[in-house]
Image: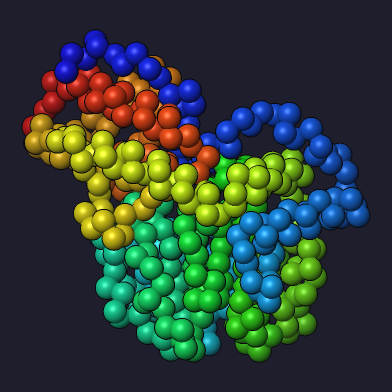
Amino acid sequence: MNPSAQPSRRPERPWFSSGPTAKRPGWSPDALAGALVGRGIRAPSSLARVQQSVDLTREVLGIPDDYRVALIPGSDTGAVEAALWNLLGERPVQVLDFENFGHTWAEDVVKHLKIDAEVLKAPYGQAPDLSKVRPDADLVFPWNGTTSGVRMPGPDFIAADRSGLTICDATSAAFAMDLPWDRLDVTTFSFQKALGGEAGIGFMVLSPRAVERLNTFDPGRSIPKVLRLRKDGRADEAIFDGALINTFSLLTVEDWLDGLRWAARVGGVPELIRRTQSNFEILSDWVARTPWIDFLASDPAIRSETSVCLQFVDPRVTGLDAEGRTAFVKRFCSALEREGVALDIAGHRSAPPGLRVWCGCTVEAADVEALTPWLDWAFAASMVEPQPA
């Protein structure tokens, strides 16, 4: 392909970042016009707006009525950390470590909480051996590996009659994949993922079993205020009744409400999943007919449909050393950014050098279609004096 032969059609929205992700179609700052800026965070009207966001999240996701929800500072990271610090220590612990965030949770459990956990590891692009998951142990895991493009193949590896708790980081799965609530005891995600919200607030969903753990187990460790879920030896009911641990941005809450209203308007989670799968199929078809690229996850059963991670397989790239491959990816992505057709699609810094294209529900299928010829163009344009290892 002639590098100068640029495609004639460009994506209307070049936002394919895996977080924060693209805003919902048609979004503009006018969506925030009703935000209660300047109001006290605990004013009745402010608390009512926060509660509205909680109620609509519950409605759109179909969260069971007996599950409790809370907003936690620090996005998904804060929500996962709150679960780890408050709940772990009563039982054996296992952690699934197959991408950056699973690795982070494993390090926190072992190095910081000093728990002798069993870490089930797998390299990027693969899933751990799920047959080793123990029903008597607490399990910490990402449902979807945002940095590896690997997702759980389904809920069957989680025992329905388990005695341990499951703590699931679902930040790039919620609103885009079917979450099995009956198998999840703690589920966390953040506003800036699947619905394109703004960062800073994490969402936590607790099953009755997780609430019982809060009520009966004292972890015996000091817990920072912004992560503290217990008060007077029991679950802090105020937090699960809409009270806030600290001050949140009401602009962020308003933006989240806007995304939720859009999600409800277009058909809820079934339509969000359909949109995501449609985007993924377009990109997958392009991968199938393109010899120089492939999925990082070789097994179709565990490929993420949201954070789609790709690797270069052309020998002119694979023959480069690590520094050369990193430079190639930078050259590739810079060419697309200069043309304004795809922003922020380089793989995560901890992952093997490659691409990561968000195909979640706020991305339009027409834009994914328009993107693929530009990926071909960028590959040809980036083939400038590659240096073999």
Task: Residue 338: give x, y in percent of width and height.
Answer: 39, 17
Asked if 366 appears above or below 1 in the picture, the reply is: below
Residue 50 image-quadrant placement:
bottom right
**What residue is drawn where x is 29% and y is 42%?**
284
Horizontal side of 165 relative to 340 (left or right) equals: right
At 69% across and 64% down in the image, what residue appears?
Answer: 70
Residue 326 spot, x, y in % from top left: 25, 35
x then y, percent, for residue 388: 8, 32
**Can residue 110 be seen at all in this image of the molecule?**
no
Q: Residue at x 69, y 85 (%)?
A: 215
Residue 337 lies in quadrant:
top left
Foreground pick, 285 / 155 = 285
Report x, y in % for residue 93.
Answer: 43, 80
Name the residue at the right extreme. Answer: 44
Is 128 located above or below residue 321 in the figure? below
In the image, residue 56 sits, relative to residue 197, either above or below, namely: below
Q: Is residue 382 above or below residue 299?
A: above
Q: Residue at x 74, y 43 (%)?
A: 254
Q: Nearer the viewer, residue 113 or 215?
A: 215
Q: Nearer the viewer, residue 208 or 388?
A: 208
In the drawing, does residue 32 fall left or right of residue 260? right
- Report the quarter where the C terminus lies: top left
